Image (spheres, rainbow, N blue to C red):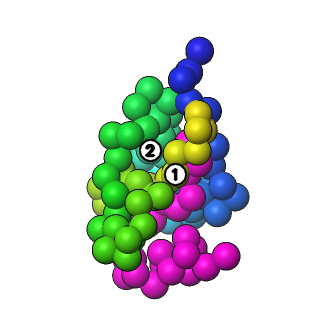
Amino acid sequence: MPAYKIQLTENATLDLGDIYLYIAQTDSIEKAEYIFGKMLNAIERFDENPERGNYPRELFELGMSDFREIFFKPYRIFYTIEGKKVLVHLIADGRRKMDELLQKRLLTP
C-alpha cells in the first residue's frame, strides 16, 4: 500500500492534457504518449518520497515553503504535501515566464 495518496487538482489535470495535445500536434502522438507516461511515472513516485522535491526558487524567495517541485525537463511539477496526501497543483513548461504563472495559479485564491 502506498505511503502517500497522490491527487491532481483540476488545473494540473488540464495542464497534463494541454501538454499532451501540444506535443501530439507539434511532434507526434507517440512522443506525446511517451512524455505523458514518463511524467505520470514521476508523479506516481511521490507515494514513496514526496520530500525529494526542491522548494521552488520563485516561491521560496517570497518566504513560502509550502510548495515543492520536481523537474521533468523542461517541465516543472509543483505540489504540496498535506499529511499523507500529495496534491499536484501545476505542471508547466519551465521555459515560460514562471513568476506570472505562479502568481496567477498558486498565490491567488
Q: Please name whichever residue, 103 or 40, is drawn nearer the observer in this view of the structure.
A: 103
Residue furthest to the front = 63
Residue drawn at the location 39% of the way across and 54% of the way down:
69
Note whether 99 is above or below 38 in the view shown. below
What residue is disc 1 on? 80
The reply to whether the C-beta atoms of the residues labelled 1 and 2 are less than 8 Å apart is no
Disc number for residue 90: none
Q: Is residue 38 visible?
A: no
What SS does tag 2 mark?
A: helix
Q: Where is residue 62 in the image (x, y as percent from the top left)?
A: 37, 76
Q: Position of residue 32 (x, y in %)?
A: 47, 51
Magenta residue check for 89:
yes
Q: What residue type is labelled 1?
A: Thr
Q: What residue type is labelled 2?
A: Met
Circle 2 packing at 10 Å, graded few (<14), some (14-19), many (20+), is some
In the image, taking residue 15 as reference, residue 66 lies left or right, namely: left
Q: Please name whichever residue, 28 or 12, is drawn nearer the observer in this view of the structure.
A: 12
Circle 1 packing at 10 Å, graded few (<14), some (14-19), many (20+), is some
Residue drawn at the location 41% of the way across and 54% of the way down:
68
Residue drawn at the location 45% of the way across and 58% of the way down:
67
What residue is disc 2 on? 39
Magenta-colored span: 86-109
Q: Quadrant of residue 56?
A: bottom left
Q: In which quarter of the image is residue 3?
A: top right
In the image, taking residue 87 as reference, residue 41 lies left or right, namely: left
Where's the N terminus, which quadrant?
top right
Note whether 10 is above or below 62 in the view shown. above
Label 1, label 2: how many angstroms apart (C-alpha)? 17 Å
Q: Can residue 57 be seen in this view?
A: yes
